[in-house]
Amino acid sequence: MKSEILRMNHVTCLDDGMPILDYLSMQVFEKEIYGILCLEYHGIDKMVELVCWNRQIQNGQVLFKEKLVNSMEISDNSKNRVALIGRQSRLIDDLSLADNMFVTRAGFKKFFINKRVIETQTQQLLDELQIQFSPAVQVKELGNFERLIAELLCAVIAGDSLIILWQVSDMLSSEELPRFHELIRRLTKKGKTFIYIYNHHEVLQQVCDRVAIFKGGRIEKVFLKSDEIQDYMVKFFARYAYEKMSSLKADDTEAVNNSHPVLTLNHIHVGNIRDLSFSIKPGENVLLLDKSNTILDDLMELLTGTLKPLSGTIEPQNIVERGNRSRRIALIQRDPINSTLFPQLSFLENLCFQLADKIPFFWQRPNLQKNIIKEYQSELGNLLEAPHLYQLQSKDLYTLIYYRYLISRPDLVVCLQPLSGADMYLRTHILSLMAKLRDNGIAVVVLNTELYDTLYIADRLIQVENGQFIIEHSRYHFDELK
Amino acid sequence: MKRKNLLSVRFAYFSAAFGIIFTGILFTAFVTSWRTVWFYVLIVLSVLVICLLVLGYWYIWNPYRETNRILGYSAARHLWEEIRQLRWPYNEPMQLAIDQFVKYIEKSTTLEMSKRQAQYLALQNQINPHFLYNTLESIRSEALMSGLGSVAKMCEALANYFRYTISNMNDLVTLEEEIQNIQTYFYIQQYRFDNRIHLTIQCDENDRGTMLKCMIPKLTLQPIIENAIIHGIEQKIGEGTVTIRMMLTERRLIINVLDDGIGMSKETVEKINRQMSDNSVSSKGKGGIAIANVNNRIKILFGELYGVTVFSTVGVGTDVEITLPRNTKQNRNTFWDKVEELH
């Protein structure tokens, strides 16, 4: 017999009269891993907020452990026993793992802390869950995977019945992900329940008992583990996205093969990178898959010129010099819409930002700006007239970021986990923008820890593990990998 | 209606004007009484005024807001039941008006239910069950004598179906009985659809015994199954499957009816879910009446925390989730007993 941890009946939330959650109904059973596949992100923030807090709703009921905790009549803003683990870490870096688990939890009232006792208790829990950590290790020394485990353990000690995992898979490599899934399965056997929110079904179906399709502020369908989600996704729920992605493959490779590489790394040693070599040519899209999730940040720093190689060469020599006005390499970080845009400036100003570095006195020459508007009017339309970025949607902001480089035409664009945090439709849009860069003769390197949809536009796949080159595949062999 | 005709708006404007003038007078009084005895008197009076304002917030403003909220909610959702919970009417005439209004609502509801009861009894009286069973039995005998075994089985199934639907006056039946009726109904439909439709029933074997003894309103599942066949699978090319999944929790019985038919558009699903949430029954919409009827009966019998939810996607199919309390006792709270309580 199952026990119900969470039930939401016909929950409706409005924002300025517009529905954010539209008759949302779902239930989660105890000891279950309930997956939520976000086809669109609209409403997911509110749903998570309502699971954690009993905020005002306009319709419906929320029951937690079969008790009514929220409805239109009673909304007391109280907190439910739910832990939220996402991109924002709640750990304190300067404390040890044991301190984070015990000392910082609510209800810990002791003035004198016996370190040995809490470390022993921490070690017992680690042994029970077969985790190889030291309880005394400082949190700032932990990697992404270890930090996630630490957050999980904090939630376990805090006694939270329900744990929400929000986009955590982006932080893990393809090797770490199965280990993480194994850990949460073990925790479900100990009575914990999980809501696993992610935007790709291939991750969710590996571990979830049920997977719910979330779109437009409601659940559209719930699949069991035994159902063939892939077929439904390709044929119905994400049909447009898959058709679009299939059409993004490059046609002509002969021109690419005959050109000179824009970047060549020869036997580079620095940080976690061990003897890495690869090259990339104009108009080519290379996917670099870091299976152990150790070198991506080092590689980005190397390409910005922040990190100098201990051995090996980068050709051409001046391509990564800091302060190089020619900006031959462009870097797009994770979540670029929150870190590389100036929302108070207009769309056009943001668009020409990189170009202004290359062309002297760009802003004093209105004819250049008019030419840009004329050239891109058909593709960008009314976006060019936007006086600021505050009202623009994520899709338009990503368009801005990639068109910025389409205009300034660097030799190479490096994208770090470009699909991280993007829902299914936004992923398709981002891939089409990267394909546009490639089709315009700009070399694109995608640094990622997982394959999924990035294979659709790649010409080559380079696999790296523990900082070392493992194998390279051309796109003609991608079907075997899928 | 124009905003300036609302008393609340006029009250707000006058209060604001009064507040400004009062503040001006108070300020003048403070200034003129500076360094006199009257200054301290004014201080004391000001403190008393502030205390009165705080008390006014708790005893007047909060109840006023609650009353506004209930009235606004009732008007927006057309759910006048909430008016009964009004704790703070503005004045005595309003209280009297609300009492009359509630009586009117109850009378209308009772009348409506009585009408339906009368219609139901009239319908029942037109169908003489014994005549029907006897006729079907005769057809069955004739079919057997003629060597038409399949026709005989069909007659038997039809007789069982009518016996369950018409004759049994109880409104709560066991889940086992309801499932048997579904299987009978499906058997009849398969003749029509030439084995194009399939039925699968799934549940946890450990809970099966307890689950089948749960009491549910009669004819909860049959309208849903009928919808799944008529509006889902019949329109589809090829075979179709209806799956019934049953789960038991500590307090609930959850029944999911899934079909792999043509599904419903997003707008239709929204409309159906809105109808069920508002407890309204629209005369339009294919399939919506049956689902809404089942939902209404469940809510009347068991309360707002139970009912029906619909999930559907075009091309994928429709899932209907029915949530009921886990109730294994035969109690007197039948639908018609609820009607009598309202008299």
Image: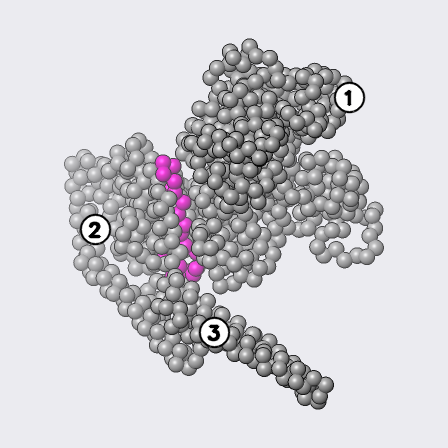
- Find out whether the residues at labels 2 and 1 contact each other: C-beta distance under 8 Å: no
Q: Secondary structure at mark 3?
A: helix
Residue wearing tag 3:
B13
Residue A96, compared with residue B31, is above or below; it is above
Q: Nearer the viewer, mark 2 or mark 1?
A: 1
Residue at position x 51%, y 74% from top?
B16
Q: Chain of mark 2?
A: B
Taking the view exactly as shown, the residue that stands out farthest to the bottom is B37
Residue A306, compared with residue B267, is above or below; it is above
Name the image quarter holding residue B157: top left
Q: Secondary structure at mark 2?
A: helix
Residue at position x 70%, y 15% from top?
A266
Q: Secondary structure at mark 1?
A: loop
Residue type at mark 3 is: Tyr
Part of the protein shown in magenta: B295-318
Residue B133, numbered circle = 2
Check chain identity for marks 1 and 3: say if they share one: no
In front here: B7 or B264?
B7
Residue A452 in sight in this render: no
Distance between mark 2 and mark 1 Cα atoms: 94 Å
Residue wearing tag 1:
A310
Residue type at mark 1 is: Leu
Crowding at mark 2 (Cα within 10 Å: few <14, some 14-19, many 20+): some
Name the image quarter holding residue B73: bottom left
